[in-house]
Image: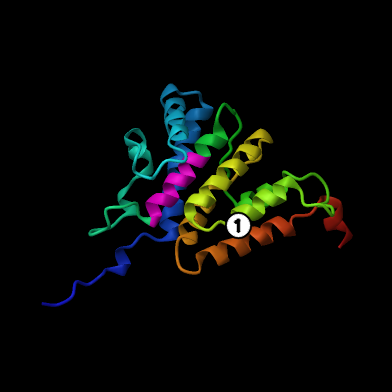
């Protein structure tokens, strides 16, 4: 009997995850900013699902799951794509809570590293800033669960300062993090964003 063939072309890609998450979040954000009761209620449900296992909270499954995130013969556990989408949507729900400004914005200038750096006024200084320590803990997370924990804390700080994120970009990175070699690649991108961000006067001096 021949061995079953795995169709790698059917596996979700990081770009598909990014498109899925960004599409769901844009639609939700439009409703929340417009103060539509259904969207506000959905945001609350997604917040309650933060920190929970992807797929374990029935009343958010219609928002966090989709055919783009799985494939025929997928395991009976969350796929990397489902995990990334769940994290992106629940993090956004924390970020957007009770705010009228859009906390999801498209574009590389709204990457996680840049956003974290904006939490620190002025130069980094000689003593490690608490935000830098949290950012470093995020980057050195041992697994996706630890990463999600540190990301929630960082997003709460971003919410306090009304600093937006590109959640499609983040979903792509969360997907990549779970793949071989992914943590190193994502960590490098975040680090470049964080340490390349300078005050306007510093940029002009160069």
Residue 128 appears left or right of 91: right
Q: Quadrant of the N terminus?
A: bottom left
Q: Residues within 10 Å of mark 1 (few under 14, many from 20)?
A: many
Q: Residue at x 27, y 68 (%)?
A: 7
In front here: 51 or 96?
Answer: 51
On the image, which quarter does residue 108 sit in? bottom right
Residue at the location (62% across, 64% down)? 188
Q: Nearer the viewer, residue 101 or 133?
A: 133
Residue 25 appears at what percent x and percent y?
A: 47, 40
- Magenta stretch holds residue 84: yes
Can you give x and y, in whole percent of width and height, for residue 45 in the image?
42, 30
Taking the spot 59% from the left edge, 45% from the top edge, the residue there is 165
Above or below residue 121? Residue 179 is below
Residue farthest along the bottom direction in this orientation: 2
Q: Residue furthest right?
A: 205
Tell me the magenta residue range: 80-91
Residue assigned mark 1: 139
Tell whether position 157 is magenta: no
Q: Main secondary structure of the magenta part?
A: helix
Residue 206, above or below 169: below
In-image side of 8 versus 160 (left or right) = left
Q: Is residue 75 left or right of residue 165?
A: left
Vertical position of residue 52 compared to residue 98: above or below: below
SS at mark 1 in the image: helix
Figure colour scheme? rainbow
Q: Position of residue 114 (x, y in %)?
A: 68, 51
Q: Is residue 104 positioned above or below 41 on the image? A: below
At horizontal 46% and vertical 31% (from top left) the residue drawn is: 43
Quadrant in which the C terminus appears: bottom right
Q: How many marks?
A: 1
Q: Position of residue 76 (x, y in %)?
A: 27, 53
């Amino acid at each position: 009997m021949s061995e079953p063939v795995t169709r790698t072309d059917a596996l979700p890609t990081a770009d598909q995850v990014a498109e899925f998450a960004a599409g769901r979040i844009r639609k939700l954000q439009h409703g929340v900013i417009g103060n539509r009761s259904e969207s506000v209620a959905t945001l609350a449900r997604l917040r309650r699902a933060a920190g929970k296992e992807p797929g374990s909270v029935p009343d958010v499954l219609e928002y966090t799951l989709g055919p783009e995130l799985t494939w025929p013969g997928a395991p009976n556990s969350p796929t990397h794509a489902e995990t990334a989408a769940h994290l992106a949507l629940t993090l956004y729900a924390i970020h957007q809570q009770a705010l009228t400004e859009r906390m999801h914005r498209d574009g590389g200038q709204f990457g996680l590293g840049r956003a974290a750096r904006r939490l620190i006024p002025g130069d980094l200084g000689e003593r490690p800033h608490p935000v830098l320590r949290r950012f470093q803990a995020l980057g050195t997370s041992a697994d996706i669960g630890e990463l999600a924990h540190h990301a929630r804390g960082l997003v709460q700080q971003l919410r306090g300062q009304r600093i937006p994120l590109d959640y499609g970009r983040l979903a792509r990175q969360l997907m990549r993090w779970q793949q071989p070699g992914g943590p190193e690649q994502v960590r490098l991108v975040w680090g470049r964003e964080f340490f390349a961000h300078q005050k306007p006067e510093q940029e002009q001096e160069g």
